[in-house]
């Protein structure tokens, strides 16, 4: 019986938000936009809260349509529903 010669490496979790990347994207897309110091962190938090809801809603749309695979249409309808809920 041979032992494995390589040890699988665990992927490290990033604990910091990608602040420089977000600032660079904001500057490229909207150069006239002025954000406060922690504005990019609020955008990152908003994305982190949006993605799990989008996944859950698209999964329920897929189950309602009796489809085994999440399609583009399921994600778009889920995004519309979540954005509608967030408006109030």
Image: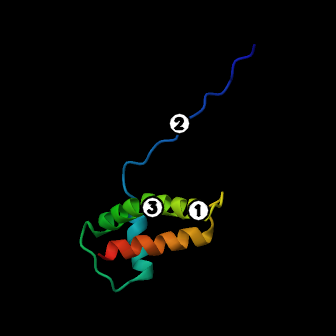
Disc 1 is placed on an element classified as helix
Most foreground residue, 68 or 28:
68
Q: Position of residue 36 (x, y in %)?
A: 24, 73
Q: Which residue is mark 1?
A: 62
Q: Which residue is mark 2?
A: 10
Most foreground residue, 23 or 41:
41
Q: Residue at x 34, y 61 (%)?
A: 45
Disc 3 is placed on an element classified as helix
Q: Position of residue 38 (x, y in %)?
A: 26, 66
Contact flag, marks 1 and 2 (Cβ < 8 Å): no
The answer to whether residue 24 is visible is no
Sequence-wise, the earlier of marks 1 and 3 is 3
Q: Position of residue 74 (x, y in %)?
A: 57, 68
The answer to whether residue 71 is visible is yes
Disc 2 is placed on an element classified as loop
| Label 1 – label 3 distance at C-alpha | 16 Å
| Label 3 – label 2 distance at C-alpha | 24 Å
Between disc 3 and disc 2, the foreground one is 3
Q: Return the mark for residue 51.
A: 3
Direction from residue 32 to residue 53 in the image, left or right: right
Most foreground residue, 5 or 70:
70
Most foreground residue, 84 or 64:
64
Q: Which quarter of the figure has residue 26?
A: bottom left
Sequence-wise, the earlier of marks 1 and 2 is 2
């Amino acid at each position: 019986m041979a032992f494995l010669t390589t040890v699988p490496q665990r992927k490290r979790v990033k604990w910091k938000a990608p602040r420089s990347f977000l600032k660079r994207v904001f500057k490229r897309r909207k150069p006239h936009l002025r954000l406060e110091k922690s504005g990019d962190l609020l955008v990152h938090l908003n994305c982190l809260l949006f993605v799990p809801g989008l996944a859950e809603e698209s999964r329920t749309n897929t189950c309602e349509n009796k489809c085994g695979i999440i399609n583009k249409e399921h994600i778009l309808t889920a995004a519309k529903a979540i954005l509608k809920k967030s408006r109030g």
